[in-house]
């Protein structure tokens, strides 16, 4: 009897295994077609001088050209500056907003979350048009009128190397924190009340509770947001493309925009593929070190 | 129960897989979505005889204000003329046409025809993706076109399409402000002006209210890539009608290039142009022109007179859709000044219908049909309607004839001024090899435009920009490949 039951169980399990493969086949096919295949193609193309009429193999020429290019290193520098200026501020802002809306009633929380999430839903192009109005360089521009109240003369926000990067950073600071806020709020809700109760019995202040309970408990969330934030920031393209086109004098040319320009302005798809793979390698390296040094005592 | 669940799940998985496969399928064979171009269209027509059915695809931007409204009529008229042929037009905006076309070209499946500037021919010819129609166009077709614009569609020995119009990139002035500043604009239209005369004129056009400038003498759109138009237009009248001399040496290492850069900075430093010029885009400067914030604007195209007239009519009628705070403007066509004692050379712009091919060699019948479609679009009634809408001169006999009964309200002085400039227009340079042309475009994108943006923003000097361009040119073409100072 037991033997029969075991046999039936094995048969059922064998069937489940087949079904499991059938189900993951959908996701696997999507991954293979839209991720694995393009990555493998990019790897092959990076060793070619690409042409739709027939590509030629040129070894590591694309890679050596890239490493010799001043523009590539300038783009890397710009990307690092942009990342350093945007990601930490985004984390602090999201965390602060999440903490501030936590004590509110449920409907108020939802309202605020929806408001902060709105820029993520809105079209990036539409947002850029609004920001172009804000950064209008003439004295009657919105931001120029604002600084005019403090006696500061009008600035050529996007047209000057000294302010163009700051303008893109400001744009990033004031938009698109909705996802991080929602994740932080969810993580805050996951902290057991008993920690706060124990702290209150011990007479802990608000800041002490923050430091000793909230921040340690949110470490996995912060690490996740940091890693995804850095990855997103290194891949930034849209804002530079729509707002400055990388100028003036390449002061806002980031790696993502450089890859686009290489591919679609100069039709050097081989070099663009090589640049993409170098970018992917840099991102992987940074993510590895982030996990290695910041994820040591993180428990999931 | 478990069996039912499995069945439902299997159906769901199957549907998802089919959805995925069909998505991939439609991506590859975009013939139903207007992308049947190149390989698809070509291969589809391979079995076609001369009267066999065939489809010609065309990627077209809003060439004139009413151009895209006429697409259905154009398709119907073409089909009436050639009952076995279908013209399938894919509309595009000016903003995305290059990207759409480049993507299709690099995927090896471009449209049969695309409306592009003649300066883009070398880029696609270098990739081998253009269709040489030299031996396919009939003598009647060729004879219909004025020779000068047709030359622009050539590269080397090949002819890659038909021109739609030949325009000049000029300047546009506000008649009232020009007269208030004591500028004899009719004389300028007829005889031109030097940079020194132009500089004094735009100084007179400046109006100040205390420290604030309420009207500039001259505003040119220079934000982003528009800056290359600004420089490109000015250097033509500084002894550099093309980036390459006739002996194929790179020309922008000439000392006159530096003189133009100095002039660009001087006009801003004089206060005749806004110090924020580097951020002024095409829309902004046109708004500044219509709202009386500048006396002269650039670049100026003939169609701007039409736009100004339309806005004037709206102001007169009290129509709320007139540009906010705009004033009535009589648009005056003005030539670009000449520099360093060089003769004025107008910047001619020839755009047209360029023929493409896919990875696979198209059939002879399909090639002939593509030429028929290109000629249909570039001549006769279609060209007459489009060019009248653009206020542009007709460049085919058939369009001139078709336009005989069409009315326009162009200022005759402007018509004469454009004709004058066309006489001095820079000639086409089909002799420049595509490789050299592509290298010059790269220098333009990687060095000239970024440095010009920095010069406009007062971050580098004209001398620094000149040295940067010279270095890039020597690195690319070698010491002997560039003009010595």
Image (tube, helix red, strand yellow):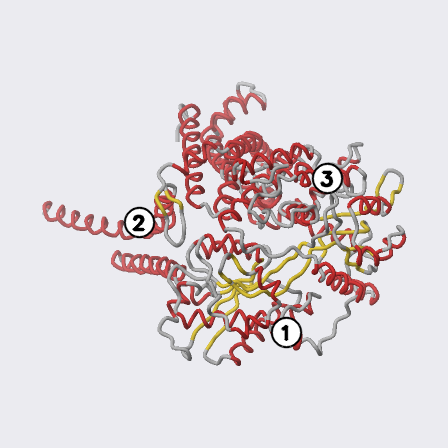
Q: Secondary structure at mark 3?
A: helix
Residue A180: numbered disc? none
Does residue B477 appear in the picture of this structure? yes
Q: B118 or B76: nearer the eye? A: B118
- Spatial CA span between label 3 and label 1: 54 Å
Tell me: B116 left or right of B261: left
User: Mark 2 or mark 3, which is nearer the start of the sequence?
Assistant: 2
Residue B397: numbered disc? 1
User: Relative to residue B39, is residue A116 depicted above or below?
Assistant: above
Residue B451: x %, y % from top left:
63, 37
Residue B251: x %, y % from top left:
61, 43
Residue A24: numbered disc? 2
Q: Are marks 3 and 2 in contact (CB under 8 Å)?
A: no
Image quarter (top left, top right, bottom left or bottom right) of the N terminus of chain B: bottom left
- Chain letter belonging to callout 2: A
- Spatial CA span between label 3 and label 2: 51 Å
Q: Are marks 3 and 1 in contact (CB under 8 Å)?
A: no
Q: Which residue is mark 3?
A: A143
């Amino acid at each position: 009897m037991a033997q029969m039951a075991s046999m039936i169980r094995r048969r059922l399990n064998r069937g489940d295994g087949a079904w499991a493969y059938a189900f993951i086949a959908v996701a696997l096919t999507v991954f293979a077609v839209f991720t694995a295949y393009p990555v493998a193609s990019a790897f092959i193309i990076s060793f070619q001088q690409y042409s739709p009429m027939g590509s030629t193999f040129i070894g590591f020429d694309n890679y050596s050209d890239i490493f010799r290019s001043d523009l590539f290193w300038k783009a890397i520098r710009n990307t690092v500056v942009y990342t350093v200026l945007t990601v930490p501020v985004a984390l602090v802002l999201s965390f602060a907003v999440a903490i501030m809306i936590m004590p509110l009633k449920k409907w108020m929380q939802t309202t605020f979350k929806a408001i902060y999430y709105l820029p993520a839903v809105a079209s990036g192009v539409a947002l850029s048009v609004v920001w172009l109005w804000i950064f209008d360089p003439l004295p009657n521009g919105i931001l120029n009128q604002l600084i005019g109240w403090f006696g500061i003369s009008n600035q050529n926000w996007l047209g000057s190397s000294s302010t163009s990067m700051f303008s893109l950073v400001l744009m990033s600071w004031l938009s698109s924190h909705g996802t991080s806020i929602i994740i932080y709020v969810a993580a805050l809700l996951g902290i057991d009340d008993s920690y706060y109760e124990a702290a209150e019995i011990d007479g802990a202040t608000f800041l002490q509770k923050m430091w000793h309970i909230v921040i340690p408990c949110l470490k996995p969330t912060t690490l996740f947001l940091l890693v995804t934030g850095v990855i997103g920031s290194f891949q930034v393209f849209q804002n530079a493309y729509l707002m400055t086109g990388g100028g003036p004098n390449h002061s806002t040319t980031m790696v993502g925009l450089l890859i686009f320009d290489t591919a679609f302005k100069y039709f050097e798809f081989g070099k663009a593929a090589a640049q993409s793979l170098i970018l992917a390698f840099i991102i992987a390296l940074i993510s590895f070190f982030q996990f290695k040094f910041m994820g040591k005592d993180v428990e999931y | 129960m478990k069996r039912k669940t499995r069945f439902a799940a299997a159906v769901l998985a199957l549907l998802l897989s089919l959805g995925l496969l069909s998505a991939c399928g439609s991506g590859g064979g975009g013939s139903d979505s207007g992308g049947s171009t190149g390989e698809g269209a070509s291969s589809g027509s391979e079995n076609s005889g001369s009267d066999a059915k065939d489809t010609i695809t065309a990627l077209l931007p809003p060439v004139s204000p009413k151009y895209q409204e006429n697409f259905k009529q154009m398709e119907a008229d073409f089909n009436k003329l050639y009952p076995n042929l279908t013209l399938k037009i894919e509309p595009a905006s000016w903003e995305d046409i290059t990207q759409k076309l480049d993507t299709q070209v690099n995927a090896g499946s471009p449209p049969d025809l695309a409306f592009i500037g003649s300066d883009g021919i070398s880029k696609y010819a270098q990739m081998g993706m253009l269709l040489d129609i030299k031996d396919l166009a009939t003598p009647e077709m060729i004879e219909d076109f004025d020779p000068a614009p047709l030359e622009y569609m050539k590269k080397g020995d090949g002819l890659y399409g038909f021109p739609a119009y030949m325009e000049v990139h000029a300047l546009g002035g506000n008649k009232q402000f020009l007269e208030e500043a004591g500028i004899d604009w009719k004389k300028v239209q007829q005889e031109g002006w030097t940079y020194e005369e132009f500089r004094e004129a735009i100084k007179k056009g400046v109006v100040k209210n205390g420290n604030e400038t309420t009207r500039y003498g001259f505003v040119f759109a220079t934000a982003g890539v528009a800056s290359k138009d600004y420089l490109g237009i000015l250097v033509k009248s500084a002894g550099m009608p093309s980036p390459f001399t006739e002996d194929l040496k790179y020309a922008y290492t000439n000392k006159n290039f530096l003189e133009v850069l100095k002039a660009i900075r001087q006009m801003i430093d004089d206060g005749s142009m806004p110090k924020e010029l580097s951020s002024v885009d095409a829309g902004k400067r046109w708004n500044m022109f219509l709202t009386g914030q500048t006396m002269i604007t650039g670049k100026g195209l003939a169609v701007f007179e039409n736009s100004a007239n339309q806005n004037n009519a709206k102001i007169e009628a009290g129509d709320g859709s007139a540009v906010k705070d705009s004033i009535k403007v009589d648009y005056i066509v003005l030539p670009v000044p000449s520099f360093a004692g060089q003769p004025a050379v107008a910047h001619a712009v020839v755009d047209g219908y360029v023929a493409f091919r896919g990875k696979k060699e198209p059939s002879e019948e399909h090639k002939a049909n593509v030429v028929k479609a290109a000629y249909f679009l570039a001549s006769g009634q279609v060209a007459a309607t489009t060019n009248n809408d653009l206020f542009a001169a007709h460049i085919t006999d058939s369009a001139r004839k078709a336009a005989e009964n069409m009315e326009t309200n162009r200022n005759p002085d402007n018509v004469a001024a454009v004709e004058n400039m066309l006489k001095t227009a820079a000639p086409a340079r089909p002799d420049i090899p595509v490789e050299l042309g592509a290298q010059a475009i790269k220098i333009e994108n990687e060095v000239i435009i970024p440095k010009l943006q920095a010069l406009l923003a007062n971050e580098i000097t004209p001398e620094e920009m000149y040295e940067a361009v010279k270095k890039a040119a020597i690195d690319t073409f070698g010491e002997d490949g560039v003009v010595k100072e």
